[in-house]
Amino acid sequence: MNNPIIFSGKIQQHQDMNAAFVNFPFDTIELFGKKGQVKVKVLFDDKVEYRGSLTKMKSDCHLLGLTQEIRKELGKTFGDIINVKLWEDKEERIVIIPDDVQQLLNQNEKAKELYEKMSYTHKKEYIRWIEEAKKEETRKRRKIKMIEMLLEGKKGI
């Protein structure tokens, strides 16, 4: 990998939601030749890896989201300082679909079509949710619920 972009930032809360981000203090046009979304690989505090995107959300600068999971793993919350090492992510993002989930999608053409149109992140969320089931009946329930949610137009869990 090429040289990382390194910076520190304060974890900020998005409105009154349990959602967090760090401001990206550089110009994405200068660094990446892009002014929209930039896919990135990130290493937080030299210990937690993440693949996501820098996004611009009616903000002065691009933002880097921090999931609840990442904050928990780091033991950090809103107002804390986080160290960031970041690289542009040029690899294709592929979600591995377990065979049983693929079979179910194959039986539901409309749901399959909707799933395939989703972003990498939303696909990953659905698959992780199913894979985290500890009992087989929970996994079955979640697979059925995934199909229902897809057909209802729900993008994420």
Image (cartoon, grey):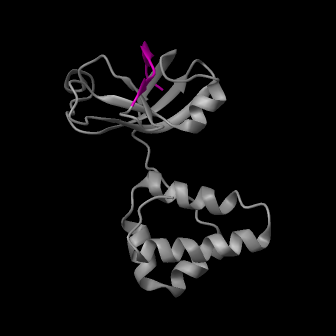
Q: Is residue 7 magenta?
A: yes
What is the count of numbered marks? Answer: 0
Q: Position of residue 124 (x, y in %)?
A: 53, 55
Q: Residue at x 19, y 33 (%)?
A: 35
Decide if residue 9 is in sight here. Answer: yes
1 or 138: nearer the viewer: 138
Decide if residue 99 is in sight here. Answer: no
Q: Which residues are magenta?
A: 1-13
Q: Residue at x 69, y 75 (%)?
A: 140
25 or 95: nearer the viewer: 25
Q: Position of residue 20 (x, y in %)?
A: 44, 31
In the image, taking residue 110 as reference, residue 104 lies left or right, namely right
Q: Where is 41 relative to 144, above or below?
A: above
Q: Position of residue 27 (x, y in %)?
A: 23, 20
Q: Where is 15 relative to 120, above or below?
A: above
Q: Quadrant of residue 75 in the image?
A: top right
Magenta: predominant secondary structure element?
strand
Q: Residue at x 20, y 35 (%)?
A: 58
Q: Where is 58 relative to 116, above or below?
A: above
Q: Position of residue 30 (x, y in %)?
A: 21, 21
